[in-house]
Image (tube, grey):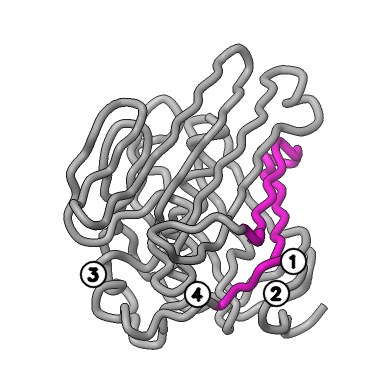
Amino acid sequence: MKKILLVSVLLSAISGTTFCQEMVDMVTPVFKVGEQLNYKLKYGFFTAAEANLRVEATDRKFDGQPAFHIVADGKTAGAFDILYKVRNRYETYIDEKTLMPYFYTENRHESSYKHTDNVTFNHDNDKITAAKGVFPFKGKVFDFLSAYYFSRGIDASKLKIGETFDLKYFLDDGVHTLSITYVGKERVKSDLGEFNCLKFNPTIIPGRVFRKDSKLYLWITDDENRIPIKAHVELIVGSVSMELTSAKDLKYPLNPISK
């Protein structure tokens, strides 16, 4: 469940494939090597997990092109670490200019369950190679980490309230689509202060974790950084929230309305 929630929360920051295609020429990195974002995930009043996202330098090249190395670590905390220990790492290598993914890997250790996958994106023949096979794709397809970092550079000023977009991403066994609706602008309080934010509502699939009427909302800073400040999702029992606890080495200043 922790892996599902982490992936859903990160993916919900995206404004969508259609919008990305229209604005592709305007995409420039709003992050830099050294950036670190730390989050806590709370189940009710209890801290259930912690997540760290960082941009690392790498000498590794793909098709002769330099790349950013992005790493996300997630782990359970407190009593949850005793009941259901999670130690997950996700990594992606993306082109420094296009921000499209070349290679994605994940190593998940969730209680007694272990899983590793290595995913190669071949943009010359539009095929993705992963542990479960080879998958053809069309257009822009991301892993969930590269999708988030790509979308941060898009001009969101043309978004209209109620507008819905579809994002294509590869995860586990194929290419999936996530629909996301832009809700509007709100002020949000966090541990780092109060921020002007853009609010999004991605579609979630009901099942063992989510109710039929569950809602997932995510708030992103309405500034040049475009980083998630807070998220909230309703579960069958209770709810989970995500909050930014620290942000280091950002490309642009983090300017809260108030602290």
Q: Disc 4 designates what residue? A: 198
Return the residue nearer the eye: 132 or 20: 132
Q: Disc 3 designates what residue? A: 18
The residue at 55%/19% (across/down) is 114
> Percent from the top left, x then y, of residue 9?
51, 50
> Percent from the top left, x then y, of residue 67?
51, 63
Q: Secondary structure at mark 3?
A: helix
Q: Disc 1 designates what residue? A: 247
Q: In which quarter of the view is residue 256 placed?
A: bottom right
The residue at 34%/33% (across/down) is 130
Question: Which mark is in front, 4 or 2?
Answer: 2
Badge 3 amino acid: Thr
Question: Which mark is in front, 1 or 4?
Answer: 1
Question: Magenta span covers which residues?
Answer: 30-58
Q: In which quarter of the view is residue 163 placed?
A: bottom left
> Percent from the top left, x then y, of residue 237?
54, 30
Question: Which mark is in front, 4 or 3?
Answer: 3
Q: With respect to residue 106, does 85 lie above or below?
A: above
Determine whether label 4 and label 3 are within 8 Å by CB: no
- Label 3 to label 2, Cα distance in Å? 28 Å
Question: Which mark is in front, 3 or 2?
Answer: 2
Residue 31 painted magenta = yes
Main structural element of the magenta stretch: helix, strand or loop? strand
Q: With respect to residue 96, does 88 lie above or below?
A: above
Question: Which mark is in front, 1 or 2?
Answer: 2
